[in-house]
Image: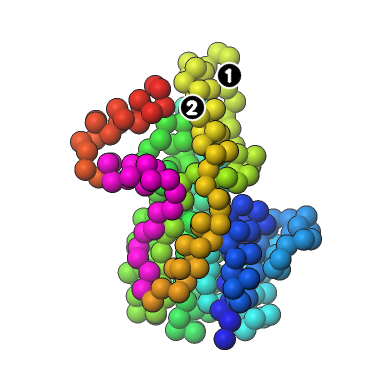
Amino acid sequence: MSKVVLITGGSSGIGKSVGDYLSSNGYTVFGTSRNPDNYKDSNFPLLALDVSKIDTIKLAVESVIERAGRLDVLINNAGAGITGPIEEIPEEEIKRNFETNLFGPINVIKAVLPQMRLQNAGLIINITSIAGYMGLPYRGIYSASKGALELITETFRMELNDFNIKMTNVAPGDFATNIVAGRYHAPVANDSPYKKHYSNTLKLMNSHVDSGKDPALMAKMIFKIINTKNPRVHYKVGEFMQKFSIVLKRILPDTWYERLLMKHYKL
């Protein structure tokens, strides 16, 4: 029987790539978008869902179960970027980012758990970020929200162990997607004490995305995880040095690692 998969943020980027790949391999895929009518050419159905609005989450999950009769895999992919000196990012933008990157995924998980518990089976894959393993300059809020989701997953895995519901994180590095277009940027103000370094770091971050990996690599990893009996707690997908940076953080003294980051960002 074809597994039923729900992907949040399935209209573009990694979510669309994963949905297309799974659909072509026989899975029953439902994606989500805040504005599904804007994506009439999607290869799989898109349901209206805004992860910051609990009522839309409940309606989308209910729709999947009503149409497919079950829900086997949730891929929490919807997310948002945010950049800027923490001092200069408006509080409402910080809260909005956490609503999208942390509280939203938690609420989607809560919505699917009753059905997965009823089935005595399920898999939840949270798309986090390699940035969530370290505090990056001018990406601190993004790092914090994705890092929090990594830790939440660790807790959920233990709490769900009795119900045969599996959960894992997949942390991508830089991929060639449209994340820059949807990212909140604190403006580079002429009178800001951070102007020089923030402006240079912003250009560096954008160039990393432009030259990033093909999202198809994430799709293949997701496919592999779905077909793994007991998924690991953490997976990383990206350039060797991006993945190796996590290893370095684990083995180097904190101040040494900090200096490496500052040198990389020319701070």
Residue 27 shows up from this direction: yes
Q: Nearer the viewer, mark 1 or mark 2?
A: 2
Mark 1 or mark 2, earlier in chain: 1
> Which secondary structure, mark 2?
helix
Type of residue at label 2?
A: Thr
Compared across the picture, whether 235 is left or right of 33 comes to left
> Which secondary structure, mark 1?
loop
Residue 201: mark in rendering: 2
Residue 90 shows up from this direction: no
User: Going by the picture, which residue comes out furthest to the top?
Assistant: 191
Q: Which residue appears at 51% of the width and 36% of the height?
A: 208
Q: Is residue 261 above or below residue 3?
A: above
- Marks counted in the figure total 2
Type of residue at label 1?
A: Ala
Quadrant assignment for the N terminus: bottom right
Q: Where is residue 256 in the image (x, y as percent from the top left)?
A: 24, 31
Compared across the picture, whether 261 is left or right of 120 comes to left
Quadrant assignment for the C terminus: top left
The answer to the question of whether label 1 and label 2 lie on touching residues, with beta carbons closer than 8 A, is no
Picture quadrant of residue 49: bottom right
Q: Distance between the residues labelled 1 and 2?
A: 14 Å
Q: Position of residue 9 (x, y in %)?
A: 62, 57
Q: Does the magenta stretch include residue 156?
A: no
Q: State the extent of the magenta-drawn residues as a range.
A: 230-249
Picture quadrant of residue 58: bottom right
> Disc 1 designates what residue?
189
Q: Position of residue 85 (x, y in %)?
A: 48, 28
